[in-house]
Amino acid sequence: MDIRIENLTKKYGGQRAVDDISFEVKTGEILGFLGPNGAGKTTTVRMITNFILPNEGTITIGGKDMRNFPDEIKRHIGYLPENNPLYHDMPVIDYLEFVGGLQGIPKEHIQSRVVEMIRVTGLNAEKHKKIGELSKGYKQRVGLAQALIHDPEILILDEPTSGLDPNQIVEIRKLIRELGREKTVILSTHILPEVEATCDRILIINRGKIVADGTSENLRKQATGKEILNIRIEDGDPNDIIKALRDLPSVSQAGFLDRHQDRFEVHSASDSHSAKDIFNLCVTNHWTLTEMIPFETKLEDIFRELTTH
Amino acid sequence: MNTIRILIKREFQAFFDSLIAYIMLVLFLGISGFFTWLFGADVFMVGQASLRAFFSIAYWTLFFFIPALTMRLLAEEIRSGTVELLLTKAVTDREVVIGKFLSTFILILVALLFTLPYVITISSIGNMDLGAVISGYLGLLLMSGAYISVGLWASSITKNQIVAYMTALFIGLFFHLLFGLLSTSFTGFAGQMFSYLSMQTHFESITRGVLDSGDLVYFLSIIILGLFLTETTLSKRKLSN
């Protein structure tokens, strides 16, 4: 099932919390939904899950309009809300059975689904405890289990790994990646490495508007525009080397990083790669290329760049 | 229908898990039993094989207990945020409201079932008017339904259980007592109107064994209006919140 969002707007008072956003998520795609606090992430997610209604715009899921078929669509969505609210007075098993029943799993399959979910999320030792007695990490697993119990085609997760220890985080990310192969996943998070590790596509939202949409490589490229290499060439006169580097057609710019250690920063011309040319240049001149490091713009920098002004 | 059944089961369990149900049952049976058998205008004092004493005390105990049962129903879900989890499942707002209403109603039904020994005991003492007993229980159930409905609405407008309790009690007080008092101090149309709004009027007419469709309409209108307002309050979050 795919999700199509068109011109979605939500106003609180006079303020536009979500301002005319449109995007699509295809089946088998994991979308990382990023943005600073108060950017409109949770509002958007709540509109997709039909907890609140948009003022304008349409949400179409699997070809059906959310306004007309909310109950039919909700059956296909697994949702882990922000802050993971749960009934603390209920034992884990009872809770999962309750949710399974509400989501329309036939009675005879509920037991096996609950057992399966407890296995997948590693809750076996805690299954008879009341949810309120569990640690934060285990509560988070219960939150994930209830979102997954009816094997939904669409999975919407708001901060799924908060409160988990590093081992659990790796496991959950792996689980999300596996699920993402056949499901449509929206992962809303603050944790940038998590997005890089799990998501096929990144959507950055700021002040209710989409400011970036693409794969992490695309975003990097957009941010820097071109490839940057940090290289070190020995056994040659630095001035000769810099001159030769600047003469290469694939290089737009070259400069010293550190004159004494023969380090240079080379900017490739847009849409071209200069690594091979630099290597060949060194071979013909009998220089020794000892380091070549592509300079990566961090996702953090892109995020800051896009959301702080 | 299946969804409502699941919702009722969960709410009903929650009553017993949180001990509210036990406390309510013990208090209700204790207080109503005490006044029916031991104190004041009790069965022995009246000297008739009738349950009038029980019905008039249950009329007051339920009035105070029901808001205590309903105050948690939605206020707690709103406070803890689980309302988002619940309403994004494949359920409608209406199913949630009906499920919560019925779970409380069934609990009251259970509480009243525990008073059946009273009926058996009294019928063995003397010649009991069974019709009046049945209509008395019916009156209590209808009254309970009305107050559950009011309490549920009070619980939907706040995240604070105490506020929900006080609001429900405040609204209930008008039906329970104030309209009745007002009807005696007004004449003409206003007096009739207050008399019609007073729950006492309808409750007494039912417990006397007179089953008037007007009384039924009165109770059912309060129930339906309360449930409708609750659903509206829940759905309003979609537009503004």
Image (tube, coloured by chain):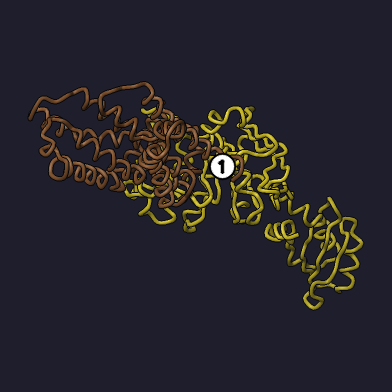
The image quadrant where one finds the N terminus of chain B is top left
Residue at 36% x, 40% y is B176
Q: Which residue is mark 1?
A: B237
Q: Describe residue A48's horizontal placement relative to residue B39 as left or right.
A: right
Q: Is residue A257 left or right of residue A127?
A: right
At 21% across and 22% down in the image, what residue appears? B131
Residue at the image position 36 percent from the left and 38 percent from the top: B10
Q: Determine which quarter of the picture holds residue B149.
A: top left
Which type of secondary structure does the marked residue at label 1 adopt? helix
Figure check: A80 above or below B135: below
**Pick the front one: A111 or B152:** B152
Question: Considering depth in this image, is A154 or B163 the residue closer to the camera?
Answer: B163
In the rendered image, residue B132, in percent from the top left (x then y), is placed at 22, 25
Q: Is residue A67 left or right of residue B174?
A: right
Location of residue A54 by image quarter: top right
Residue A295 in which image quadrant: bottom right
Q: For the image shown, how many numbered marks are present on the structure?
A: 1
Locate residue A204, reporting x and y percent: 69, 50
Q: Residues within 10 Å of mark 1 (few under 14, many from 20)?
A: few
| Shown colour of chain B | brown
Q: Which chain is yellow?
A: A
Which residue type carries mark 1? Arg
Pinpoint residue A179: horizontal percent, then vertical percent. 53, 40
Residue A61 x, y percent position in the rendering: 62, 32
